Amino acid sequence: MAHFAKISEQNKVLTVVTLNDKDMLDTDGNPSEAVGQAYLEQHNNWPAHLWVQCSYNTKRGVHRLGGTPFRGNYPGIGWDWDLTDQIFWTAEKPYPSWVKDVQKGSWVSPIGDPPDLTQEQKNQNAAFTHWWGYVWNETDQTWDLTNSEA
């Protein structure tokens, strides 16, 4: 099965549909996004150029089955289609300072990922005695360590 996002003229994802592989084969029997787009236009009365193929198995720039990631993310309704970078983005920017990371297919803080927890903190989380984690502090532009006892 192939997946296609139906997008608006404003590049917002309206819905995501599945398409039988046989409905997107070119004359040589190879899968073709253009053939799939033409099929969807004919059967859904929506312009071919506003159907964009996506991968159900791609999230945050990683293919969950070890394959090649395709277009950053499997989109949801309301997500943005970035025509320039050929990637789907969640429309919600977590914080004003965060930026798009095309390789990761996600929004990232301006200073990168949070620090790793210590092994002791991880062990306490695993034992459900505490919950250690980092939260983004937009005011100070830092990752703040938080802890709550279970």
Image (spheres, helix red, strand yellow):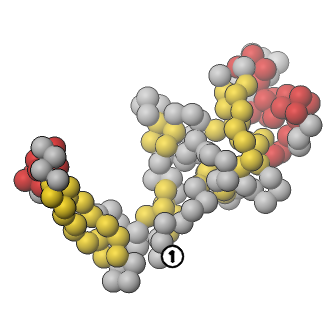
Q: Residue furthest bottom?
A: 139
> Who's the residue at 47% across and 48% down the image?
60
Q: Can residue 49 be seen from the camera position used here?
A: yes
Note whether 49 is above or below 31 in the view shown.
Answer: below
Note whether 56 is above or below 107 in the view shown.
Answer: above
> Who's the residue at 49% across and 66% down the image?
94
> Who's the residue at 48% across and 47% down the image?
61
Image-quadrant location for residue 84: bottom right
Q: Amino acid at mark 1?
A: Pro
Q: Can residue 25 be seen from the camera position used here?
A: no
Q: Position of residue 113 (x, y in %)?
A: 32, 62
Q: Nearer the viewer, residue 5 or 133?
A: 133
Q: Position of residue 15 (x, y in %)?
A: 72, 42
Note whether 84 is above or below 46 in the view shown.
Answer: below
Residue identifier under label 1: 96
> Who's the residue at 48% across and 62% down the image?
107
Is residue 7 left or right of 38 when viewed as pictured?
left
Q: Determine crowd level at label 1: few under 14, some 14-19, many 20+ residues with C-alpha closer than 10 A.
A: few
